[in-house]
Image (cartoon, coloured by chain):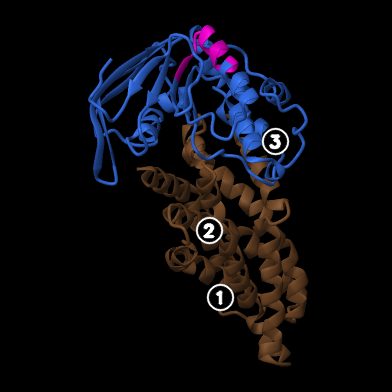
Amino acid sequence: MRLRASNIAVERGGRRLFSNLSFEVARGEALLVVGPNGVGKSSLLRAIVGLLPLADGTLSCEGGDPDASLGEEAHYVGHADALKGVLTARENLEFWAAMLAPFPSSRAEAGKVAVKSPMKAAQALDRLGLPRVLDLPVHALSAGQKRRVALARILVAERPLWILDEPLTALDEAAERLFAGVLREHLAAGGLLVAATHAAIDLAGAIQLRLGEAEVSL
Amino acid sequence: MREAAAALFLREWRIARRIGGSAATGLVFFLILVTLIPFAIGPDLKLLARIGPAILWIAALLATLLGVDRLFQSDEDDGSLDLLTTARLPLELTVLVKCAAHWTASALPLVIASPLLGLMLALDVKALALSAATLAVGTPALTLIGAIGAALTVSLRRGGLLLAIIALPLTIPVLIFGVAAASAASGGPTPFATPFLALCALTLAALAGAPFAAAAALRHARE
């Protein structure tokens, strides 16, 4: 599977954020989008998932499930955690696991790009160092804990392309290290990653895409 | 696809039933409205029995629209709506399942409570049964029409008033046929069957059309 953007442009509220942007991400590769505030990092990620229309250019995905749109192949973690405060961490994660999982019919075809079988909610929280909050309502958790539950979402359903917008917000150092490990595993298993971040993520061989200073194309 | 729909229904149901959810609010509002009106009208039992079905219907209409403005707004606020649009479940089905859960959690209790409250309005047994039957058939249309308004106002911070302005005119046909069928027992001008069938038709039409309209509005709000 390969994500290819050619000469894309994104507008927000009538203002063109960037244009003529091209990049490619192949299996096992990570693209880190960096740049100052307001330069369009989040908008770029939202455009990849299909939540923001492209003003120009094309985004394509080769070798994925032909029935799925790019957004349906992608895990998107935005600024909001997409968690319901009145539900427990387990209820939230089990809901998203059912909701975001690929349909059985398409899973067979996607077999060649499938990363690995998804984890259970408890396993995923364990992996991110949150073993004891499983049955607590999410509104009782701290900001960092909520963020970890939100990140655990991408482990409970299987999607090859991970689009992460500032994934490390509110995480402590130990959680950052754990999560970097999760990302390395995802890449080693042939997954794709596009992340916008201010904090440094420890990923060997990640490509940097710098927005805002000059029109960079890779 | 069935698993995803079932998981969504369960989630919506749980959120509505937990403390602070929309289910109890609508029922209490319904109760307050129906209790207050006999006090306002006074001790004329004949008059009360004659307008009783209409009172039940207006109270049910307002109680249904009361909670429906949060149908998509709460998901928009916490980012869930972004993910729901990238799920494999078609957005039209997502809308339909959310409406079904909302109806089960907040409108079905009204239908069940309506015979009880009808007693306070001096309705006889037949009128109680007919009112409950018309509410059971008609309230899904109210929820679905409300969902269109909720989808159109999803990106507005306080869209509640606008929702009422958009949705209330569309609910007038449902109200007319609902009250006409319900008051057939208490000396209404029409027989029961004709307006009741029209009410069924309105609900079926809303069932067929509203998910597409609401999904289109939600997609448009993304852009």
Foreground disc of the pair 2, 3:
3
- Residue at which label 2 appears: B69
Which residue range is magenta in the image? A181-193
Percent position (x, y) of residue B77?
Answer: 52, 48
Residue A188 included in the magenta stretch of the image = yes
- The answer to which of B119 and A216 lies nearer the viewer is A216
Residue A6 appears in the rendering: no
Rendered hue of chain B is: brown
The local secondary structure at tag 3 comes to helix
Foreground disc of the pair 1, 3:
3
State the residue at coordinates (67%, 55%).
B21
Chain of the residue that carries numbered disc 1 in the rendered image: B
- Residue at which label 1 appears: B190
State the residue at coordinates (28%, 30%).
A212
Q: Disc 2 and disc 1: Cα gap in Å?
A: 34 Å
Total numbered labels placed on residues in the image: 3
The local secondary structure at tag 1 comes to loop
User: Mark 2–mark 3 contact, CB under 8 Å?
Assistant: no
The local secondary structure at tag 2 comes to loop
Q: Residues within 10 Å of mark 1 (few under 14, many from 20)?
A: some
Chain of the residue that carries numbered disc 2 in the rendered image: B
- Residue type marked 1: Thr
Q: Quadrant of residue A64?
A: top left
- The answer to which of B65 and B132 lies nearer the viewer is B65
Percent position (x, y) of residue A190?
Answer: 50, 8
Foreground disc of the pair 2, 1:
2
Q: Is the magenta stretch mostly helix, strand or loop?
A: helix
Above or below, comparing residue A202 to residue B8 in the picture: above
Q: The blue chain is which one?
A: A
- Residue at which label 3 appears: A89
Left or right relative to A181: residue A73: left
Q: In which quarter of the image is residue A129?
A: top right
